[in-house]
Amino acid sequence: MEAQIKVKRFNPENESESFYQDYSLDVAEDSTILDGLIKIREEIDGTLALRCSCRASICGSCSM
């Protein structure tokens, strides 16, 4: 399944304002947004920075 994800980006080293960047990627039907963001970082755009947890459903961060 093809997904479209729009990410708000900001570079603190740059004095420019934040901007939105669109990504298009193939994902499984049961994928979460977190799965998509990790796929973007690992396969499409290594400059994407995000914080994620262990995905063990302990704190709920991965339920995004």
Image: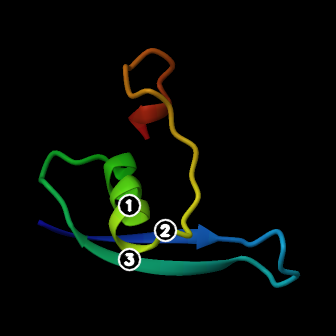
Q: Quadrant of residue 25?
A: bottom left
State the separation of the CA atoms marked 2 and 3.
13 Å
- Figure quadrant of the C terminus: top left
Which amino acid type corresponds to the residue marked 3 in the rendered image?
A: Tyr
- For mark 3, what is the residue? 23
**Which of pointers 2 and 3 lies earlier in the amino acid sequence?**
3
Relative to 36, 9 lies left or right? right
Label 2: which secondary element: loop
Q: For the residues carrying marks 3 and 1, which lies nearer the camera in this image?
A: 1
Name the side, left or right, on which 25 lies relative to 14: left
Q: Which residue in the protein does label 1 denote?
A: 42
Q: What residue lies at 13% left-to-right and 54% top-to-bottom?
A: 28
Measured from the top left, where is residue 58 in percent x and y? 45, 15
Secondary structure under tag 1 reads helix
Instruction: Report how far apart the C-alphas of labels 3 and 1 lie in the structure.
Output: 13 Å
In the figure, is residue 32 to the left or right of 18?
left
Instruction: Relative to 31, say whether 60 is above or below.
Output: above
Q: Which residue in the structure is indicated by mark 2?
A: 46
Number of numbered discs on residues: 3
Q: Position of residue 16 (x, y in %)?
A: 82, 84
Q: Could you tell me how far apart the alpha carbons at marks 2 and 1 are, in whole angstroms?
A: 6 Å
